[in-house]
Image (cartoon, grey):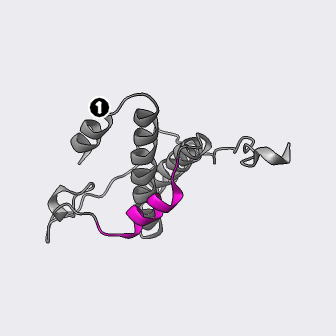
Amino acid sequence: QQQQFVATVDAASGKEFDSTAVQIMRVTHGQIFPAIAKIRASTRNTLVRQLADLANDTVLDHITVLEKTGLVNHDQVNYQQTNPPKLPSEQVTPPVPQQGAPMVVLTPRPDLDVQTAAPTAGPTPDPSPSSK
């Protein structure tokens, strides 16, 4: 799937390259965002919770930056995020775990002190040029 993303962006140039890259990244970040929330909400493992918090903050920051480019087509993003992928499930990122696959329990390293903080939003550009 990611190789196809790279091939799609490589086939474009100039403004088309920019808008294609931003669109792909915004869709994929929007697709992984609820998966992170689901993982965070369904575990009591403190290390996994810390990692999910950090991943959530990072993905939200990336989404915010992508949207500030003004190149995101929100209708297309919503369509792609709410419709099932056209790829077989074994090719979708992340792959679905196999039935009966062993579970690994992670424990925090004592020397690892993960500090997470929500990203701060910058100023939002005024989309209407007539209001100036």
Q: Position of residue 122 (x, y in %)?
A: 72, 41
Name the image quarter holding the C terminus: top right
Left or right position of 83 against 34:
left
Q: Secondary structure at mark 1?
A: helix
Query: Can residue 43 be seen here?
Result: no
Left or right position of 22 against 98:
right
User: Label 1 amino acid?
Assistant: Asp
Q: Position of residue 28 (x, y in %)?
A: 39, 52
Residue in front for this viewpoint, 4 or 76? 76
Query: Can residue 106 be seen here?
Result: yes
Is 112 contained in the magenta span?
no
> According to the image, label 1 marks what residue?
10
Is 76 contained in the magenta span?
yes
Q: Residue at x 53, y 58 (%)?
A: 74
| Residue closest to the far front | 130
Q: Residue at x 59, y 43 (%)?
A: 70
The total number of labels drawn is 1
- Give the magenta part as a residue range: 72-84
User: For mark 1, does the 10 Å Cα neighbourhood hold few (<14), some (14 to 19), or many (20 or more) residues?
Assistant: few
Is the stretch drawn in magenta largely helix, strand or loop?
A: helix
